[in-house]
Each structure stands twice: as structure tokens, then as C-alpha cells.
Amino acid sequence: MDSPYPVATPLGGEADPSFLRSLFPLLILALAMASGFTMMTSFSLVQEGAKAEMHLSDTILGVVQGVSAAVPLVLFSIPIGILVDRTHRIRLLIGLSAIWTLGTFLTAIAHNVPMLFIARMLAGIGTTGGLTAALSLIADLCVPAQRGRAMLIVTMGKSLGQAGAIALTGWLLGLFLHAATPAIFGNIAPWRSAHISLALLSFCALLPLLLMREPARREVAASTHAPFRVIFGELWARRAFLGPLFLGQVSVVMADAAAAIWAAPVLSRSYGLAPQDFAGWLGVLIFLTGVGGGILGGLVADMGQKSGRRGGLLIGAVVAAGLGIPAALYPIAPSVPLFGCALGMLILFGTITGLCTSVALTVFMPNELRGLCIGAFIAIAGLIGFGIAPTLVTWVSALLGGESHLGQGLAIVGVIVSALSFIAFTIAMRRAPEDALHEPI
């Protein structure tokens, strides 16, 4: 590998790589993200087996699944973001890959709740931190006009990983449940064997990272080792742009998080469907709209960037946020097909805004601020989106008359936060800087 601190190159210099030349390292990053998100979300498919073997309650499972995911978001996203800005990112990503691989292996051998909690937390720390490092690397592998499509490739890896958590883990579990494979890991529960297999696959998936070289950092306004007072001064100077951008994306996450938690109960309570009646088509819907949103988000981000209009990169986010307002009415749709179509549109538009926001951070923020900003976005969005939005829905439904009004409460919260995101993204677009080396007006 080259020096851990490559020389920064300016925007548009001779060192600018072609997109095809950047494709190989982008595919390696996509593979790493696919692996990480598979390891992070794989336990949900085998948790019933773990519950039976370890005699766990639903409350304990909720802590293991929920709190272990929230802790990395809140406590580690910003520190890891600072490391991304100031250290060798490839080495950091390899270390984070090893952490999520270790978390997967420890899941397989955990025999008490504290160990299982730590194992799932390590998987979350590695994956969310790895995503921050990957986004920073993307920015230096491609020029600004190419970052939308580059982000699309890595986002596809993330979506593949989330789908793989269901498909791959389910396939492995089936193999060990039906004794279709030898007991190569000894006389242990099938869900444990599945996670040992996943850990081995994760180790293999991180090996291509050893082939990557740390790219030179581009668009550095101060220094990657500038004192923190300088870094926070740069953040403060961009507050008029970052504030509404944060607000817009956090509002989108609130709508998406509320949908992820309450869509299934609404289908059961308001439409009379059993879980087996909608699990299949709902899973396919979430995957397809996530992938479709990633593709559209990458394309519209690059098209907006090429428009030459100030803040044009965020045009797609503004339009998607606006279309998300009527889509948020899905919980009160008159039929299940309309419910599914509107929910799919909400997920699609949310994915577009998320990708446009990520690209905006890589284009409009100096290199020494990107990891910190991405980490702060992940921490704040996770805390508010998953910590406040679901409870807000139940509070509104209680005001309306109780649990039977869950659908109306979900629709009200969804419309309000979607409208807020539209306003915030519009303001952010108008206040966007010319590029990463210029402060907003």
C-alpha cells in the first residue's frame, strides 16, 4: 500500500480518474458493503431459533436487536467519521470489516445475553462505520460529476446485503436444519452453524480490500490533520446549508422508520391480513423499491450536478420529498393494492433523497469534513428516526382514540414529516455552496 497520508489533489486536476478506471475499486467497496449489511441484519431471520435455545423473552430479543443497533449509531458514528477524515481509510475499512466478521462469529458461539448483545453490537459498529469510510472513498475515486453513479454501485451492494440477510441466511439455515450438509461445525444448533458459515464468507469478502490503494484526498480546504477548532469553524461556516440538509434527511428517515415498524400492524389491524398473507410481497416490494430508488437517485444526482444550477444536485431530493407527501397517505388507502403502491413510492422516494444527500456531502463538503458529517447524519437520523418517530405515531393515534386509529396516526405523522423534508431540502438547495472549497452564501 502507499503512504497513509496521500497528497491531496485539487478538483479537476490531472489525477482525475476515468469512471471505468474507478469501477474495480467501487465494486470491491460494493462487495464489502453487501457483506457488512448481510452480517448486520442476518440475526433477525434466526432469532426464533436463538430464542428457543437460549430461553429468551421477546423483551430481551428486542434489546438485543434494537439497542445493539442503536448504540453504534449514536455512540460510534461520529468518532468513526473523524477517523475517516484523519486516517488511512482502506486500513480503517479492513479493520471495520474484521469487526463485523468477529461480531458474526461471536453471535454463533454466544451462550448468554451479554455476549450475544456485544456480538450484535460489533456487527453494527463495523457495518455503519464501514459505510462512512466507503462513502468517503467514493468521493476520492471519482470526480463530482460521477459521484451519483458511483454511489449507486455501492448502494446496490448495500441493498444486496440487506436482501442477502434473508436469502443467504435462510438458505444456510435450511441446509443445517434438514441435515443436507455434514455437521462440519460439530453438534451445534442450525442457527449457530449458519452464522459460522456467514462469518467465513465475510472473511473471504474482505480479502479484496487488500488489493485497494488509498486514493489521494481531493478538495481539501484546510488539512486532514487540522486542529478541531478549525474543523468546527468550517462546520459553523456551513451551518446555513448543513442545517436544512440535516433536517430534510432526518425527516425522511422518520417517515421511513415509522413505516418499517408500523406498516405490518396496520395491514393486520386495518385490512385484516395475517402476516403470511403479506410477508412475501412486502419483502419483494421493499427490495425492488430500494434498488430502484438507488438507481434513480444516482442518475438524478449526476444530472442535477451537470445542470450547472446552484444546488442542482439536490433537485432530485426536492422533487422526491414533494412526491413523498401524498405517498405518506398509504396507511389510509382504500385497498391493499393501493396501500402497497403508495408504500412502495414512499420507500422509493426516501431512497432517492438519501442517496442525493450522501452525494451532496461528498460534493459540497471539504474532504476533512466528510466523514464527520456522514457520521453525524447517521447518528442523528438513527436517534431521531428510530427513537422518536415510532413513539410519535402511537402518541398521535392515542389522541385520535386509541390503537384502532394506528393507520390514521401513521398517515398524519408521515405527511407532516414529509412536508417538512420538502421545505428543508428546498432551503438547502438554495443555500448550497458552489463546490467543496467554497462556503455557502
Image (cartoon, rainbow, N blue to C red):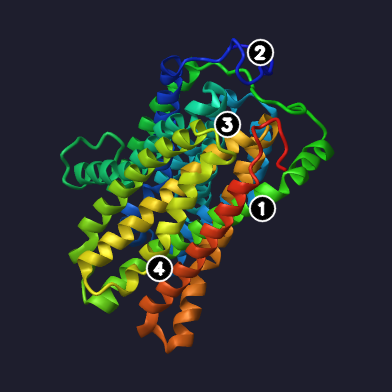
Quadrant showing the N terminus: top right
- Three-letter amino acid code of the residue under disc 1: Gly
Q: Mark 3 points at which residue?
A: 136
Q: Do the residues labelled 1 and 4 touch (CB within 8 Å)?
A: no
Res 320 seen here? yes
Residue depicted at 66% across the width and 48% down the height: 242
Residue lying at 20% horizontally and 46% vertically, measured from the top left: 174
User: Which of the two discs, 1 and 4, labels the residue nearer the N terminus?
Assistant: 4
Identify residue type, mark 3.
Answer: Ser
Q: In this view, does 311 lie to the left or right of 5?
A: left
Q: Do the residues labelled 3 and 2 touch (CB within 8 Å)?
A: no
Q: Distance between the residues labelled 4 and 3?
A: 38 Å
Q: Mark 1 points at which residue?
A: 243
Q: Residue type at mark 4?
A: Asp
Which residue is tagged 4? Answer: 58
| Front: mark 3 or 2 | 3
2 or 4: mark nearer the eye? 2
Q: Which amino acid does label 2 sit on?
A: Ser
Upstream in the sequence, badge 1 or badge 2?
Answer: 2
Separation of residues labelled 1 and 2 (CA atoms): 35 Å
Q: Residues within 10 Å of mark 3 (few under 14, many from 20)?
A: many
Residues 76 and 135: in front is 135
Nearest to N terminus: mark 2 or mark 4: 2
> Is residue 337 placed above or below 6 in the rendered structure?
below
User: What crowding class fits label 2: few (fewer than 14 Cα within 10 Å), some (14-19), or many (20 or more)?
Assistant: few
Mark 3 or mark 2: whose residue is earlier in sequence: 2
Residue 105 image offset from top left, x and y in percent: 43, 39
